[in-house]
Image (cartoon, rainbow, N blue to C red):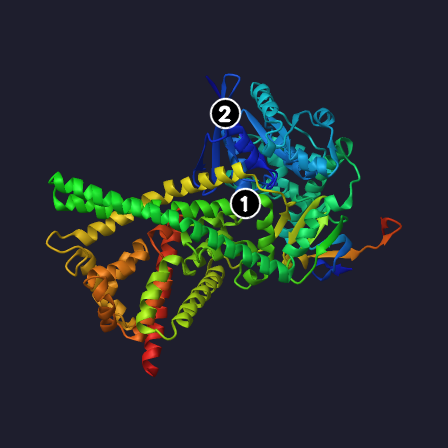
Amino acid sequence: MLRLNSAVNGYYRIVRIGLECPEAKRRLTTLGIFVGDIIEVTKSSPGPVIFKKGETSIGIGQGIAMCVSVIPLKLSRGRLI
Amino acid sequence: MKEKTIILTGNPNTGKTTLFNSLTGLHQKTGNWPGVTVEIKEGFFTHNDTRYKVMDLPGTYSLTSFTEDEKIARDILVKKNADTVVVVADATNLERSLYLVTLMLELEQNVIVAVNMCDAAEKKGININIKQLENIMGIKFVLTTANKNIGISELKDLIHSSAVLTEKKSIKINYGKEVEEVISELQPIIKEFTPPYPFRFFAIRLIEKDAEFIQKLQKEGVYSTVEKIINKLESLCPDIENFIVEKRYAYIHGVAKECVTKEKLLEEKIEFTAKLDKIFTHTFTGSIIFLFFMWLTFQIVFNLGGPFANLLDNLFSNISIKVAQFLYFAQLPQWITSLFTEGIISGLGAIIVFIPNIFLLFFIFTAMEDSGYISRAAFVTDRIMHTIGLHGKSAIPMILGFGCNVPAIMATRTLETKKDRIITILALPFMSCSARLPIFLLFTSIFFKKNQGSILFSLYIIGVLAGMLTARIFKSLFFKHESSHIIMELPPYHAPDLKNMLISAWERTSLFLRKAGSMIFAGVVLVWFLSYFPLSAEYASRESFTGIIGSFLVPILRPAGFGNWQAGVALISGLVAKELVVGTFGAVLGGAKNMSIALSQLFTPASAYSFMLMTLLYIPCIATIAVIKQETGFRWAFIATVWSILVGWIAAVLFYQTATLFF
């Protein structure tokens, strides 16, 4: 498990959005980003992190990226595991 | 003719403004919703013998009280009691848009949905079955591509048929046994306090801990009972707010699964945005491109706008001469001639001369917004802006401030939170606008001939540092606990629509004219009055009221090294417009020819630099104050004015006193 701000480009599953960032959590959920979602990081640190969920690209600042915990996923036979 | 009210709402970047422009054409105006600074555009169209007033709400994702836009959107929806609410949905991302639709239905509005940007969805292989959507959600949907005028007449037909319905639509998402029980339990306690909101909407907002609804019940003295009930629920589900949102999305996901299908397309078609993003958001290339775009904006705004501004300036000079001649032949008193030529006409000129630059600036801004670039620019500058307690979106208006502070302050409207807007606006006047350049050129050419470039550069740097310091200080003083987090959806890139750009740029420019114009005009006339009277004194002489005020300022200005009444008068006239400082020196020092000699007698190199520091840092002009007042209210305009004068004076005194120790 790692924080989103230290994730390199690739696929991840969100496993936690920290309660220490309640506002960030609320804004992310309003945008349809939940724990359990699979995301693709398209731009990693330094600076803000940009990730895709489905058709949507979302950019988040370092502060918020630190509140999001993810686990990396690997592509195997066309499926993410 | 009957009149109906339509409210247009939707997520940001769904093409809402383009749809609004397509519906209303040029029949629109912008006003502020009472008590807030958020713009509400109103437009009109006539269809089937009915006149429709369309209100365009700010783009929003939800209807909570967490952001100003959301609160206002909700407020208007409830208080305006519109005949129909049109939710503009993004066809390429329907699930996200349907979230707002479900909220509108919980708010029991007469909703229809315009599924916009269908051409983009088609390119992505997305097919939407609107008949199925209508069956499931019980409301009407129409497919549109606003920038190509596709589906607009169908939308008008739908609005027409929908607006005659008196029945409000609603939805009842099942939030689970526990939540539903709490809603039922709350009913007898709060039902009488919920109007104008529907009871169920109000109850759900309470469970979601919406501060505005909580406060309403606290005032009624029933919140403690409500809190106990909600606390019980929270003991079962600690993250209840997100649970509610998840339930809504689960419902929407189910709807989308039934109604939206996606074909597999060639990768390169889909990856166009991703490829551009690799360059535009990259730490290095992104920064270079951002700087280039900002440079280009400057060039266009000032080089292309400059000749038009000069034309207008000349036009007003000619009008002034003609009017002076006419009034002379009419044998009217001298003060009336002066009031018209030096007061009213030059006042009007001072406002209108801004139009070409402001129009071009807003034109470029709309292009950046429409194309999707503006959100990328915000990301590129985010790291730097964090050091002063702001985030990336604030960088764009600050850079534009080097051109002219007035449109730059108006550009802060793209910032979401009040805190970000206020701090950016307070820092902005320190960015050295182009009007300050003639003052610097005059003084550096007299006192710093050998180091003109370096002195000029040092002033720009000091301006930036003063802006950064201001942002830091005000963040710590007034917004200590408010953090700046950037969370933004990055819309796909697309070509901006020319018609939309022209309409938006003009609409924003005319708003500036209406709002700031009256105050600039009043300020110019006031300075004329102070310079002209008493009648026994020459215009702007030591005996005029401006001269008297200038003399009064002498003891205050003396520690900064320029304790002479002429400098005082020049600084006062600089409040109207910084361009006037050089002209005023010319007037009070016996004309442009004598100015250099007279200035070298009045100033030393140290006091000249100190004077430049003062003109750099004290409030740029009346137009800037007017726009700050317009955007933030009287309190912040007053703080910005006093603060910048203080910073300017302290910097000038510190510099002069230190310099005299060494030189």
Does residue B152 appear to the left or right of B353 in the view shown? right
A21 vs B490, nearest the viewer: B490
Residue B498 position in % (x across, y down): 54, 39
Residue B78 position in % (x across, y down): 53, 31
Does residue B623 appear to the left or right of B184 in the view shown? left
Q: Quadrant of residue B327?
A: top left
User: Disc 1 residue type?
Assistant: Ala
B3 vs B375, nearest the viewer: B375
Residue B80 position in % (x across, y down): 50, 29
Q: Residue at x 39, y 58 (%)?
A: B434
* Disc marking residue B367: 1
Which of the chains bears the disc numbered 2?
B
Does residue B658 appear to the left or right of B383 in the view shown? left
Dot 1, how many residues are within 10 Å of its Cα: few (below 14), some (14-19), or many (20+)? many
SS assignment at label 1: helix
Instruction: Read off the residue under disc 2.
Output: B45
Q: Residue at x 25, y 42 (%)?
A: B319
Check the image and report above or below for B218 versus B173. below
SS assignment at label 2: strand
User: Disc 2 residue type?
Assistant: Phe
Which of the chains bears the disc numbered 1?
B
B186 vs B125, nearest the viewer: B125
